Image (tube, rainbow, N blue to C red):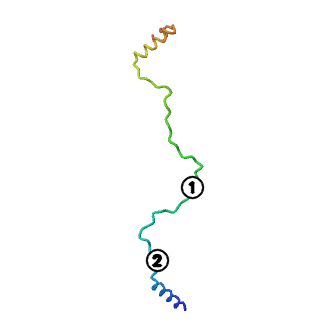
Amino acid sequence: MKNMKIKKFTDFIVENGQTTTKPDVRPTTKPGTKPGRPSPIPSTRPSVSPDPKAKLSKSSEKEISQKFMKAMKKRGESISKYIKK
């Protein structure tokens, strides 16, 4: 009895010619995915180097000494206490 049913089934498939075939080209659409839950730990951010507090100009020793002497003259102080003996 089982063999008869199997034979009828195979005959039916052969007559109708319906067989499962794989598609020649893969589909380009991908199944959608849900976005994941955000992490409670923050990601590392790039560090920023701070700017210097004062921009230094490159001055010669002579210019610095002249500025110092002018400032001392404006204050009325003597330069002798700053000179090494």
| Badge 2 element | loop
Q: Position of residue 75 (x, y in %)?
A: 52, 9
Q: How many numbered discs?
A: 2
Q: Amino acid at mark 1?
A: Gly
Which numbered disc covers residue 20? 2
Residue identifier under label 1: 36
Residue nearer the viewer, 67 or 4: 4
Indicate which disc residue 4 carries.
none
* Left or right, residue 38 beside residue 72: right
What residue do we see at 54% from left, 90% from top?
2
Residue at the spot 49% in from the left edge and 35% down from the top edge = 49
Q: Amino acid at mark 2?
A: Thr
Which badge, 1 or 2, comes first in the chain's sequence? 2
Is 21 situated left or right of 40 in this image?
A: left
64 in relation to 7, above or below:
above
Q: CA distance from mark 1 to mark 2?
A: 37 Å
Near-viewer residue (61 or 67): 67
